[in-house]
Amino acid sequence: MINRDELLKEPIEDLNLKDLRNYANIISDIFEKVYGFSSEGIIRASQVLKEMMREADLRFLSFTANLVSTGLRGLFADLIKEGYFNIIITTGGTVDHDIARSFGGKYYKGSFDFDDSVLRELEIHRLGNVLVPFESYGKVIEDVVRKFIPEIVKDKKEISVYELLWEFSERISDSNSILKAAYDKKVPIIVPGIVDGSFGTNLFIQSQFYNFRINLFEDMKLVKDLIFSCKKSGALIIGGGISKHHTIWWNQFKDGLDYAVYVTTAQEYDGSLSGAKPREAISWNKIKPDAKNVTIYGDATIILPILSASLLS
């Protein structure tokens, strides 16, 4: 039998923007010389993002939860702290992983090839090649929700999700936390699928004792108000699913995004939203016909540090 301690010996560390300062000119120094194939996409995406930062007053960062189990968590937090993005749209698992890691949960470096039956016996979850010990996930989230919900809902029997997340964020001290960064900058985190995960399930359980409700319509109203009041909007959309769709869906009501950068590993041949390119979104009014847009095919754990570094140049 594999020794559990042997598997859990290299914790995942968070990447920060300061770690990338020596690579600020990576686009001009490397990718503009290579240029071919995917390099061109990285060059164009960097250009679109830089223009988006200058011209768009509403800037969406949309991503999927799996990335928050990696060192990208700290990078997401820094991109929020530094004001690059002012609205976040993500999935329920982002809240799970961020709270778990903010309150002492440790995730570890692993392998895609481990025997999952053995991992189950050792009480270790596997998320790709990231190892999540049982005690670092569900129990941590359950304890946090159970501890703070009574004081949060004491005078509030109904609350929007983004405000509820700010309430939890106020109680976080981890500088690499996405939730804390958003709270400090008063950036709303919109999670349309909040009940799909441990945090949401524990909210439901606690609602049975404290008689409170979450109000997703208030989150939708906030997004609607931001969309209708902005002059230009842009989005960096990493991955697909509900976070991608919610971002482009709401932008159709202002005739579409002005800027869009997709980072994805999904393909369009099966008609999935996750694989759909920006050109398809144009037909739905979700992206403007004259919008600056680009799709990069690749793993976000490689692409995002490159794009983030280029924003520092």
Image (cartoon, rainbow, N blue to C red):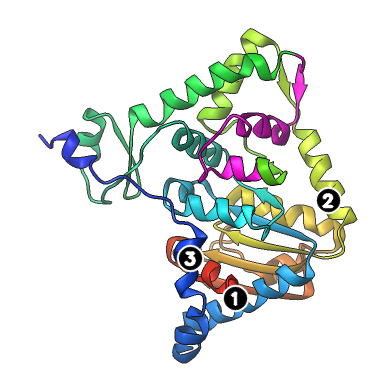
Dot 2 corresponds to which residue? 226
- Do callouts 1 and 2 mark residues in contact (Cβ within 8 Å)? no
What secondary structure is found at the residue carrying circle 3? helix
**Residue sitting at the far top:** 209
Residue type at numbered disc 3: Pro
Residue 15 seen in the current view? yes
Q: Nearer the viewer, residue 114 or 175?
A: 175
Q: Is residue 258 left or right of residue 70?
A: right
Q: Earlier in the sequence, mark 2 or mark 3?
A: 2
Residue at 26 percent across and 51 percent down: it is 111
Residue 190 seen in the current view? no
Q: Earlier in the sequence, mark 1 or mark 2?
A: 1
**Residue sitting at the far bottom:** 33
Dot 1 corresponds to which residue? 46
Q: Nearer the viewer, residue 296 or 85?
A: 85
Dot 3 corresponds to which residue? 305
Above or below, 189 against 281 in this view is above
Residue span colored magenta: 155-182
Viewer-nearest of discs 2 and 3: 3
Q: Earlier in the sequence, mark 3 or mark 1?
A: 1
Q: Position of residue 247 (x, y in %)?
A: 70, 54
Residue type at numbered disc 2: Leu
Q: Is residue 21 left or right of residue 248?
A: left
Above or below, 107 against 71 in this view is above
Q: CA distance from mark 3 to mark 1?
A: 11 Å
Q: Position of residue 197 (x, y in %)?
A: 52, 32
Which quarter of the image is occupied by the N terminus? top left
Q: Position of residue 18 (x, y in %)?
A: 49, 62
